[in-house]
Amino acid sequence: MDWQELISGAYGSIGRNLERALEGLKKEDLGWQPHPESNSIGWLVWHLTRVQDALISGVMGQEQLWLKDGWHKKFGRPAQAGDAGVGHKPEEVAAFKSPGAATLLGYNRAVLERSQRFFPTLSSKDLDRTANLPMFDPPPTNGRVLLMVLDDNIQHVGQVAYIRGQRQGRGWMPH
């Protein structure tokens, strides 16, 4: 197995875990916060997908699907490339209105599919290049960006599953 297959598989597991964690959830489940300063499931899924879209788009040198494919409209959000939830205050998280599991997963699938088509095109030298992401000072390498996104997404999908467990108890996850 080469590194491209390994990273593609790791990103793919995030998508599969999201699919399972969101199965059967209603909008009220997606918007539920265990505490007023906690994230909701819907916000977490939106945020982790936005992070992947924004940062991997930057590595690719392409426009974010959020803007290019009009996902922002389906979420009722502004057409802002920087709208990814980073730095959101509790009031902003509480105000987030989830469009429903189908839209959350549709956006995640689109971003994941594009990321997985991109990974095989990268060489080891590409990973060592500095990423064109001016929001970082100093900017990381492309390889570091892929790992940052992977780490962020793994943490957030675990949080999604945990919050669902808080909402519904242990028995929600099929064996």
Image: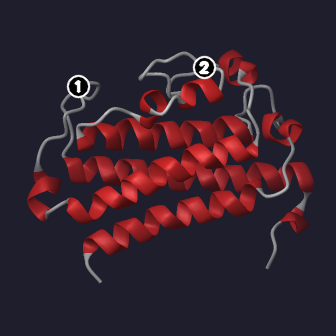
Residue 85, quarter of the rendered image = top right
Quarter that holds the C terminus = bottom right
Q: State the separation of the CA atoms marked 1 and 2.
A: 23 Å
Identify residue for label 2.
77
As drawn, 129 above or below 12: above
Q: Is residue 2 left or right of residue 68?
A: left
Residue type highlighted by circle 2: Arg
Left or right of 134 on screen, residue 46 = right
Describe residue 162's horizontal placement relative to residue 60 as left or right.
Answer: right
Task: For mark 1, give the secondary structure.
Answer: loop
Can you say which quadrant of the picture contains the N terminus? Answer: bottom left
Label 1 sits on what residue type?
A: Pro
Depth order, front residue of 158/54 = 54
Residue at the spot of label 1:
134
Q: Is residue 80 above or below residue 114?
A: above
Q: Nearer the viewer, residue 12 or 91?
A: 12
